[in-house]
Image: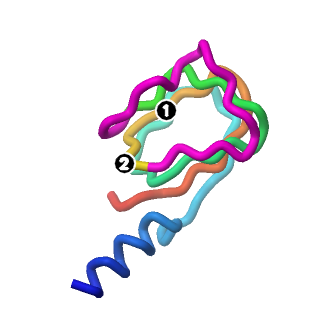
Amino acid sequence: MALQADISTEYSMGRHGSFITSSTSTQTGAYAAIECVTPTVFVSVTGENMSGYNSATTFPAGFQIRGIISAFQLASGTVQVTLGRS
């Protein structure tokens, strides 16, 4: 049980790496977190139990979205994306 918890923690902390993007194209994949590097507006964020991430809200630099994320699209801003378990 402890090993499984350790592995889950490693995945949530970026075991598979991360990347920075400001692309406004839809990004799809297995992501564990998105952190706003600059003030950011999302077109959408798709994942398990995700809601409220739309173009009506500007998220400040430092804001983090954590969870099982399968896709996102930026309207503006720059984010660091942590890769999740695929």
Q: Mark 1 points at which residue?
A: 72
Q: Is residue 55 above or below residue 34?
A: above
Secondary structure at badge 1 equals strand
Three-letter code, disc 2: Ile
- In which quarter of the view is residue 79 placed? top right
The magenta segment is 47-66
Q: Residue at x 36, y 61 (%)?
A: 85
Residue 64 x %, y %:
60, 46
Q: Quadrant of the N terminus?
A: bottom left
Q: In this view, does 36 lie above or below 3?
A: above
Q: Distance between the residues labelled 2 and 1?
A: 12 Å
Q: Is the magenta stretch mostly helix, strand or loop?
A: loop
Three-letter code, disc 1: Phe
Q: Name the residue under label 2.
A: 68
Q: Is residue 10 or residue 24 the one in the foreground?
A: 10
Q: Which residue is drawn at 47% across and 23% down?
A: 52
How packed is label 1: few (under 14 Cα within 10 Å), some, or many (20 or more)? many
Specify whether 57 is left or right of 66.
Answer: right
Q: Determine the residue located farthest toward the bottom in the rendered image.
A: 2
Q: Which residue is drawn at 37% across and 40% down?
A: 70
